Image (cartoon, rainbow, N blue to C red):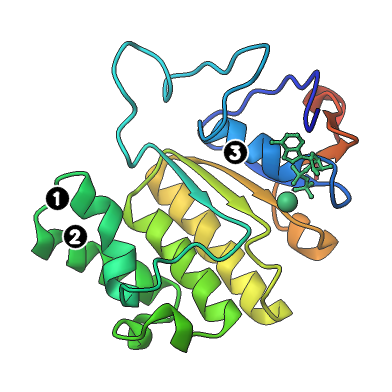
Amino acid sequence: MAVRNVSCAIFPGARVALMGPSGSGKSTLLHLLAGLVRPTSGSIEGELVEAGKPAGPGTVGLVFQSPSLIPALDVLENVALPLILAGSPEGAARGAARDALALLGIDWLEGNLPEQLSGGQAQRAAVARVLACQPRLILADEPTGQLDHATGVHVIEVLIQAADSLDAALLVSTHDPLIAGMLAEMWQMQDGGLRDPDEQETS
Ligand SMILES: Nc1ncnc2c1ncn2[C@@H]1O[C@H](COP(=O)(O)OP(=O)(O)O)[C@@H](O)[C@H]1O
Ligand SMILES: [Mg+2]
């Protein structure tokens, strides 16, 4: 089993780095929290996922570890798509998408197709797509893995700033201790388990 016996809680204001070796279950935990996969046992509860009404498309945002842009759409269309699918008027969706791209410093790439982007540019577009939806829980799976250190630091700063202004929680998986050090808390995974967050070091 990819993840087992994990118990954790995350609140608005949380700024958490999720660390652990490859295969320790980081992506699986993030996918569970995003509601993309259901636990075979146990439950995931919260303001975002219960209360009898479906979570809006914006309430939880996940930046995937692997490239996830739609190849046939340009960058602006990719970033605006979740808002359009959620019923935003196209003009408002494109405006929000442009703002998010500007935050990530890649608004100049808005007309490019994904195949015309570097790995790091595509990663930043995927971050912009999440922020454009103004989620209350921001999950990012190794968002700096393809970036040079300075750009990685910038992306984490943008994520923290966005989380602050949205009063959101932020959970970022990373292998990089310097990136992890930018976040207030660290959760450590190993062999599909998570050490009790109460016992984790805070910095
Ligand atoms: N749906 C699944 N069913 C069973 N095992 C899985 C599934 N998805 C991933 N795994 C396995 O679970 C472990 C954790 O994977 P993953 O969450 O991707 O770890 P990480 O992101 O920390 O590298 C790996 O051994 C992986 O092969
Ligand atoms: Mg992973």
Residue designated by label 2 = 93
Q: Quadrant of the C terminus?
A: top right
Q: Residue at x 42, y 25 (%)?
A: 48
Q: Residue at x 31, y 77 (%)?
A: 74
Of the numbered discs 1 and 3, the one sitting upstream in the chain is 3
- Is 140 above or below relative to 41? below
Secondary structure, mark 3, is helix
Secondary structure, mark 2, is helix
Amino acid type, callout 1: Ser
- Is 184 above or below relative to 98? above
- In three-dimensional space, the C-alpha distance between marks 1 and 2, rounded to whole angstroms, equals 6 Å
Residue designated by label 3 = 31
Q: Residue at x 35, y 12 (%)?
A: 51
- Is 32 above or below relative to 148? above
Would you say the beta carbon of the disc 2 residue lies within 8 angstroms of ligand 2?
no
- Between 65 and 189, the one nearer to me in the picture: 65
What is the x, y in percent for residue 22?
85, 52
Would you say the beta carbon of the disc 3 residue lies within 8 angstroms of ligand 1?
yes
Disc 3 packing (10 Å; few <14; some 14–19; many ≥20): some
Residue designated by label 1 = 88
